Image (tube, rainbow, N blue to C red):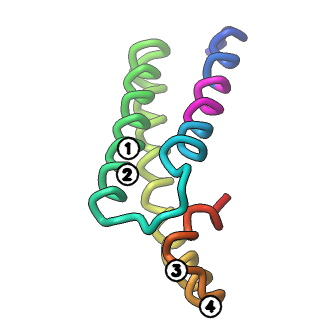
Amino acid sequence: MAVDAWAWVAFVALILILLALDLFVFHREAHEVSFREATLFSGFWIALGLAFGGVVFLWIGPVAGGEYLAGYLIEKSLSVDNVFLLTLLFTYFAIPPKYKHRALF
């Protein structure tokens, strides 16, 4: 299963563009994230991750697509403990809600 160098360059470029959008466009101003906004952003990132899994499935094959989906679901389930840990840290350091996103970066 060899992936061309241009695909890796495109993948890294896409990640950098999405990170820049998240930091400098979507969260340009410090504000308290509402439940609705958090739900929309979570849905967007989950849909993007699943769409990438679809690309892997179509481009590399069903085995690789299934492996990606399994890994994605495992990582998603393991990220729940990070939410608990971040809640503890934000509470301990008394970080105001509007600065929580900035504290993560």
Picture coordinates of residue 76 (x, y %)? 45, 55
Cα separation between marks 3 and 1: 21 Å
Above-or-below relation of 51 to 88: above
Determine which residue is flagged by label 3: 87
Q: Are there few (<14), some (14-19), or many (20+) residues within 10 Å of tag 1?
A: some
Q: Quadrant of residue 89?
A: bottom right
Q: Nearer the viewer, mark 3 or mark 1?
A: 3
Instruction: Say which label, 4 or 1, has the lower sequence index.
Output: 1
Instruction: Say which label, 3 or 1, has the lower sequence index.
Output: 1
Determine which residue is flagged by label 4: 92
The number of discs equals 4
Q: Tag 1, which secondary structure?
A: helix
Cα separation between marks 2 and 4: 25 Å
Cα separation between marks 3 and 2: 17 Å
Left or right: where does residue 8 sit relative to residue 26?
right
Left or right: where does residue 33 sit relative to residue 9?
left
Return the residue nearer the eye: 97 or 50. Answer: 97
Instruction: Say which label, 4 or 3, has the lower sequence index.
Output: 3
Determine which residue is flagged by label 1: 46
Return the residue nearer the eye: 11 or 56. Answer: 11
Query: Pointers 4 and 1 in contact (CB under 8 A)?
Result: no
Amino acid, disc 3: Thr
Which residues lie in the magenta part? 12-18
Amino acid, disc 1: Ile
Return the residue nearer the eye: 2 or 100. Answer: 100
Instruction: Say which label, 2 or 4, has the lower sequence index.
Output: 2
